[in-house]
Amino acid sequence: MNLKTSILLLLVGISIVSCDKKRVFDEYKTVGRAWDKDSTVSFDLPELDPLKKYNLFVNIRDNDDYKFNNLFLIVSMEQPKGVVKVDTLEYEMSDPEGNLLGDGFSDIKESKLFYKENVHFPKGKYKVNIKQAVRQNGKVSGVDKLEGVTEVGFRIESTN
């Protein structure tokens, strides 16, 4: 490898690392070829500074097999002392023409979906559980196997 190539790779590496200074936690878990409606993706959160504020995101990696415009999630956060807060969330996943939203060059897209902002984490253990709750129009029961979603992630960023 010549000197020019080495310097270029070093600069690219530094820029990638420096662009993500706010990241505190970022983890993905695979759901296989289809996300089962009874499957829960769980994340044990690290101990966080109780004096700081954080923004929380759900990250989704999907591909062209995803057939819906929206994604419905049930996200629960288990907090210290047995408190559990549950949110039902809806995210737009495609444009009006049916093209997947998100970042990516191939048929795999990554979407960083806002969950909560300016959250404090008093001392204790926290766990986040995420389930899909997608339903077809006019049907009461959920989609048994949600195709197209390959990985589910959870991200915490420092606000300062």
Image (cartoon, grey):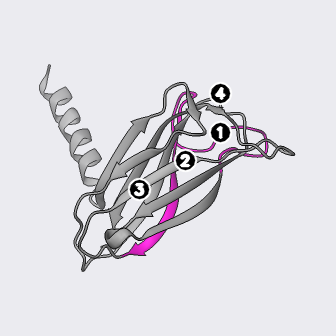
Q: Is residue 80 magenta?
A: no
Eye-nearest disc, 3 or 4 = 3
Q: Is residue 51 left or right of residue 74?
A: left
Residue that badge 4 annotates? 65
| Secondary structure type for disc 2 | strand
Residue 118 sits above or below residue 152 on the image? below
Label 2 sits on residue:
131
Look at label 2 and name its amino acid: Lys
- Helix, strand or loop under label 3: strand
Dot 4 alpha-carbon crowd within 10 angstroms: few under 14, some 14 to 19, many 20 or more: some
- Give residue 100's mark: 1
Q: Is residue 55 left or right of residue 138?
A: left
In three-dimensional space, the C-alpha distance between marks 1 and 3, rounded to whole angstroms, equals 26 Å
**Which callout, 2 or 4, points to the residue nearer the camera?**
2
Q: Which residues are magenta?
A: 92-119
Residue indicated by mark 3: 128
The numbered mark, 1 or 4, whose residue comes first in the sequence reads 4
Please state which amino acid type lies under the numbered disc 3: Val
Marks 2 and 4 sit apart, C-alpha to C-alpha, by 19 Å
Question: Is residue 101 found inside the magenta-colored segment of the image?
Answer: yes
Q: Are marks 2 and 4 in contact (CB under 8 Å)?
A: no
In primary-sequence order, the first of circles 3 and 4 is 4
- Three-letter amino acid code at disc 1? Leu
Seen as rendered, the residue at the extreme top is 1
At horizontal 22% and vertical 34% (from top left) the residue drawn is 8
**What residue occupies the far front of the structure in this picture?**
82
| Marks 1, 3: nearer the viewer | 3
Residue located at (64% from left, 28% from top)? 64
Task: Report crowding for label 3: few under 14, some 14 to 19, many 20 or more residues within 10 A (C-alpha).
Answer: some
Question: Circle 4 sits in a helix, a strand or a loop, which is it?
Answer: loop
